[in-house]
Image (cartoon, rainbow, N blue to C red):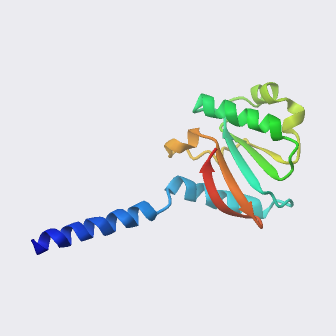
Amino acid sequence: MKAINVYFTALLLMTVVVSCQRDTYESELESKLNLFLKNEKVDYEYVIIIPGSGCTGCITNAENYFLSNVGNNKIKFVFTNNFSKKQLFIKLKKTNLQRSNIFIDNDNYFYLRDYDKSIYPYRAKVINKEIVEVTML
């Protein structure tokens, strides 16, 4: 009986430890964003990562959010994993994508292909040029 209690206690502790750990995708994205923000002159409130392919409905919603908020200079928009820059320009208007709060990630630095979650748009909350939270948009 005592062995069973020890087993369940150990199992409970392992569950708590594992559930409290941050997901590696969010952690890696946070690290990359923190490095990126060090070179930015503007102190943004949010960074929005929008992949070019993946969850179609999610990406469409994120692109609509972009079109509604492109003029908000407290939001940095990052477009990554795009097959065609020309298509992106046509879909979201070239003049919108040439603003200072837009970054087109031609090198796919923010597209973490080893993670399934990279197909979804993400929002990072920024305070004093430091990422404090990364969530799916």
- Across the whole image, how many numbered discs are drawn on residues? 0
Q: Nearer the viewer, residue 55 or 94?
A: 55
Q: Is residue 109 visible?
A: no
Q: Position of residue 36 (x, y in %)?
A: 73, 58
Image height check: is 74 above or below 84?
below
Q: Nearer the viewer, residue 100 or 47?
A: 47
Looking at the rendered image, the quarter that the C terminus falls into is top right
Q: Is residue 119 left or right of residue 35?
A: left
Q: Position of residue 54 (x, y in %)?
A: 58, 33
Identified at 50% across, 42% down, the residue is 116
Q: Quadrant of residue 32?
A: bottom right
Q: Is residue 49 visible?
A: yes
Q: Position of residue 17 (x, y in %)?
A: 39, 67
Q: Position of residue 29 (x, y in %)?
A: 61, 54
Q: For the view shown, which residue lies furthest in the left direction?
A: 1
Image height check: is 18 above or below 77?
below
Identified at 81% across, 34% down, the residue is 67
Looking at the rendered image, the quarter that the N terminus falls into is bottom left
Q: Nearer the viewer, residue 77 or 4?
A: 4
Q: Is residue 89 left or right of residue 51?
A: right
Q: Is residue 9 left or right of residue 18?
A: left
Q: Is residue 68 left or right of residue 126?
A: right
Identified at 75% across, 32% down, the residue is 64
